[in-house]
Amino acid sequence: MYKVVIILVAILIAIMAFFYFGTYSEGVRAGTLIKVSKRGTIFKTYEGQLNVNAFGAVTKGTLDESFEFSIPNDPDLVKKMEELTGFDVQLFYKEKYFVFPWLGETKYMVSDVKANNDAPTSDQRYPGRN
């Protein structure tokens, strides 16, 4: 009887670890970083929004679409994203299987951000600030 319980607990732990650490997909999204904020009632997490300009099939011009994402608790990444708010960026992300409230509000976890073209460095955007 104990062996069966131990095996069932081990299987349950393996399944939970798969969903917690596993990645459903990985990708890159490009657009204008429009928002980075820390929010939450019990678990404070960093969340962001990217404005993805896509070509509309029905209307002429571009169609604004937003991409909501979560930022892991990485102070360097958060600072970099705050500095790039309002500029065109590429977001590298991993899509998780489930939303875990202590990790973020979305399944999309950003792992890195890269500035496109004319986005300034911290020294250029905030002269005299270190």
Image: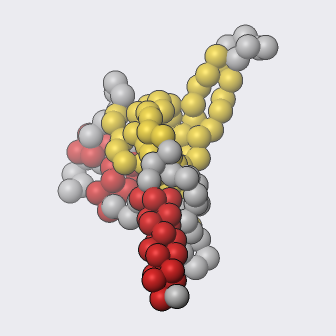
Percent across and percent down for residue 127 are 25, 47
Name which residue lies at 67% across and 13% down: 61
Q: Residue furthest right?
A: 58
Relative horizontal placement of residue 42, taking residue 103 as reference (left or right): right
Name which residue lies at 33% across and 49% down: 80
Position above or below: 16 against 86:
below
Percent across and percent down for residue 84 are 39, 43
Residue 45 shows up from this direction: no
Residue 97 shows up from this direction: yes
Between 57 and 82, the one lying in front of the other is 57
Relative horizontal placement of residue 96, taking residue 110 as reference (left or right): right
Position above or below: 32 against 111:
above
Name which residue lies at 32% across and 62% down: 75
- Residue 63 sits in quarter: top right
Colour logic: secondary structure
Position above or below: 68 against 120:
below
Q: Which residue lies furthest to the front in this view?
A: 1
* Quadrant in the picture for the C terminus: bottom left
- Residue 100 sits in quarter: bottom right
Between 84 and 26, the one lying in front of the other is 26
Q: Which residue lies furthest to the top in this view?
A: 60
Position above or below: 67 against 38:
above
> Number of callouts in the render?
0
Relative horizontal placement of residue 84, taking residue 4 as reference (left or right): left
Name which residue lies at 48% across and 33% down: 29
Percent across and percent down for residue 108 are 52, 49
Between 49 and 105, the one lying in front of the other is 105
